[in-house]
Image (cartoon, grey):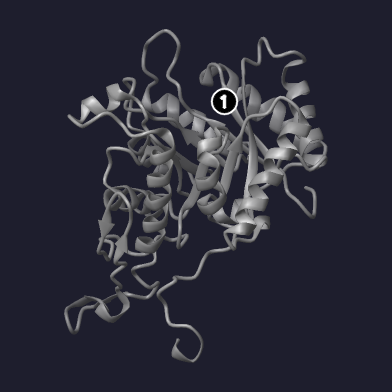
Amino acid sequence: MTGVRPLHLAAELAPAPPDGGSRTVAGTVALARLAEDAGLDFLTHDDSFARPGLDALAVLARIAPETRSVGLVPTVTTTHTEPFHVQAAVATLDWVSRGRAGWRIAVSPGAAEARLFGRRPAPPTAALWQEAGETAEVSRRLWDSWEDDAEIRDVATGRFVDRRKLHHVDFEGAAFSVKGPSIVPRPPQGNPVVVVDATRPAARETAARHADVALIRASSPEEAAGLRAELHRAARAHGRDPGLLRVLLTLSADLDAHPGGPAALAGLAADWHGGGAVDGLHFVPAVPGRDLPRFAAEVAGALRARGLFRTAYEGTTLRDRLGLPRPASQYAPKGADA
């Protein structure tokens, strides 16, 4: 392991097999366990209203009790969904997984997706990402709306919560308003990890302002370093510590066809991370059932052999894996009032 800046590895569980069939629950659980045995930071599961498939949140909630350490990050769109329901679902996944939940924010810009809900044509993509940013902001407030010790379960008095430690968030955005508090106690991580694919310029502002992990695509280490620096500058402009924003390169590959195979991919991850271009790699396998086992065994194994990747999990939460602190509730009393 590098002492100063650990290398992070993540992988995508979707799509389903290319033959049009569906992966069995046992097969998906087996892939998740395999990734966990290899020490991967987290697994993503894509989702969209635009194509048939399983609900990503439901799939990862099913996997949660079957795993113990790997992070679980479903894609959840903020378009055509209620922010209050989205944050409650992600908070519940964090409880079910005992602190290993994340959330990859997505938007649904297609007119066909809007028609599925009987709605007007979707607004421009930039407006959707603004709405996504507001959803991320109100989610953080709702996760904080229960102080950590609000749940008291006092049998003698019949009180479940200390109402003095529940807070209305009173959020007013351009697209919606939320009163609060949440209906789910504060998640184990305080705030589940927020992931944003910042490849498209329209998503970068939301990533810089709200993401714990930004995913990028780049064809050279220089391009990746430039995107990482851009995200860090924007995060600082929003008053954030850019050192707490992880930037991972998303790389789609068929390991049977990738030049140099797993060894070359491990070399790329080592070189780009060592050169400061990225904090790690988010691997999207062409065929998860075939490529993910090779990524776990050969790519992660090669990086571990070089001393660049963990030999065992440290801590218990996804935030622990990523070296991110557990945020204090913004509503909890501070200082002399605590």
Which residue lies under the disc numbered 1? 284
Q: Residue at x 28, y 81 (%)?
A: 164
Q: Residue 292 in the image: x percent, y percent?
A: 58, 24
* Residue 239 image point, x, y percent: 59, 63
Left or right of 241 on screen, residue 14? left
Numbered disc 1: secondary structure = strand
User: In the image, 238: left or right of 183?
Assistant: right
Query: With respect to residue 145, does 224 lie above or below?
Result: above
Say whether residue 140 is left or right of residue 169: right
Q: Quadrant of the C terminus?
A: bottom left
Compare residues 171 and 41 and report the one nearer the observer. Answer: 171
Amino acid under disc 1: Val
Please indicate, yes or no, whether residue 269 appears anywhere in the rendered image: yes
Identified at 25% across, 64% down, the residue is 179
| Residue 311 in sight | no
Q: How many marks?
A: 1
Residue in the picture at 32% in, 67% down:
169
| Residue depicted at x 25% and y 78% | 163
Residue 135 drawn above or below residue 123:
below
Q: Is residue 301 above or below residue 176?
A: above
- Position of residue 287 measured from the top left corner of the image (x, y, whole percent): 53, 16
The image position of residue 88, as x and y in percent, is 31, 53
Residue 83 lies left or right of residue 116; in this view the side is right
22 relative to 218, above or below: above
* Residue farthest along the bottom direction in this orientation: 336
Q: Residues within 10 Å of mark 1 (few under 14, many from 20)?
A: many
